[in-house]
Image (spheres, helix red, strand yellow):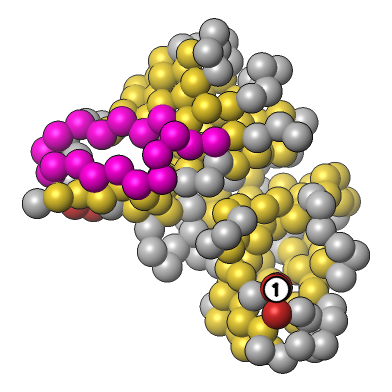
């Protein structure tokens, strides 16, 4: 069936550097993509979303890039901070239902 | 504005029992979705309710059921619990059942022994 996957299960980044978390999706008909952050003991927290009519969207210290040609989604976090340590999920929207990736754990090195 | 509230926070049940979990969505949100999260399977969609009607259902057995009340609060029930039902159950609400961000609660951690 359709699925959304993540390239790297764990990503280690030096504090202050930029982080890039990647995600591949398989359903070319999907028109909505979203990123969540989940800290230990908490539910997923919405970070940013993007619709298929856009290829880039920026938020506070975060940017989502969508490449529909290769069905690839990425989340860029600028100037990574210790508080960014979490598991990051991408999800693909279609038929009023989100299909979730497995998650990438972001580790911040001091 | 209060976020999504899930109760209880933790539950321990034995095999064969049943359990009911509760979710209060953000005020004004009419769509409520439920997810099961386990280390091995990630986030798995259970069902989604909108205006008291189940509009979408994931691939879970009939032991998993839910409902939504007129005030948008929702409950999910799991009957005849199995060890494999041990998981974090997450509730999320949104403005509508279209493609808008889900806002999650912190979940109910269910342990089945």
* Image label count: 1
Q: Which residues are magenta?
A: A5-22
Q: Residue at x 64, y 25 (%)?
A: A26
Q: Position of residue B29 (x, y in %)?
A: 66, 48
Q: Residue at x 41, y 15 (%)?
A: A56
Query: Label 1's element?
Result: helix
Q: Chain of mark 1?
A: B
Q: Residue at x 80, y 73 (%)?
A: B77
Q: Is residue B26 visible?
A: no
Q: Position of residue B63 (x, y in %)?
A: 87, 70
Q: Residue at x 53, y 62 (%)?
A: B39
Quadrant into which the N terminus of chain A falls = top right
Q: Say left or right for B81 vs B24.
A: right
The residue tagged 1 is B84
Question: Relative to the observer, which residue lies in front, B69 or B81?
Answer: B81
Q: Say left or right for A46 vs B62.
A: left
B97 vs A22: above or below = below
Q: Is residue A94 visible?
A: yes
Question: Is residue A13 one of those drawn in magenta?
Answer: yes
């Amino acid at each position: 069936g359709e699925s959304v996957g993540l390239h790297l299960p764990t990503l280690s980044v030096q504090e202050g550097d930029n982080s890039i978390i990647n995600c591949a999706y398989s359903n070319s008909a999907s028109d909505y993509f979203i990123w969540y952050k989940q800290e230990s003991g908490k539910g997923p927290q919405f970070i940013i979303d993007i619709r298929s009519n856009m290829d880039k969207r920026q938020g506070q210290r975060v940017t989502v890039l969508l490449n529909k040609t290769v069905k690839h989604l990425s989340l860029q976090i600028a100037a990574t901070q210790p508080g960014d340590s979490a598991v990051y999920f991408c999800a693909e929207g279609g038929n009023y239902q989100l299909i979730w990736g497995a998650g990438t754990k972001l580790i911040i090195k001091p | 504005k209060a976020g999504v509230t899930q109760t209880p926070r933790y539950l321990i049940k034995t095999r064969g029992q049943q359990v009911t979990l509760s979710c209060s969505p953000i005020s004004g949100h009419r769509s409520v979705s439920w997810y099961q999260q386990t280390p091995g399977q990630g986030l798995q969609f259970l069902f989604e309710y909108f205006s008291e009607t189940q509009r979408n259902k994931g691939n879970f057995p009939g032991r998993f059921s839910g409902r939504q009340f007129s005030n948008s609060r929702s409950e999910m029930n799991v009957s005849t619990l199995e060890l494999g039902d041990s998981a974090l159950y997450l509730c999320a609400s949104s403005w509508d059942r279209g493609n808008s961000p889900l806002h999650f609660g912190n979940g109910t951690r269910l342990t089945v022994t």
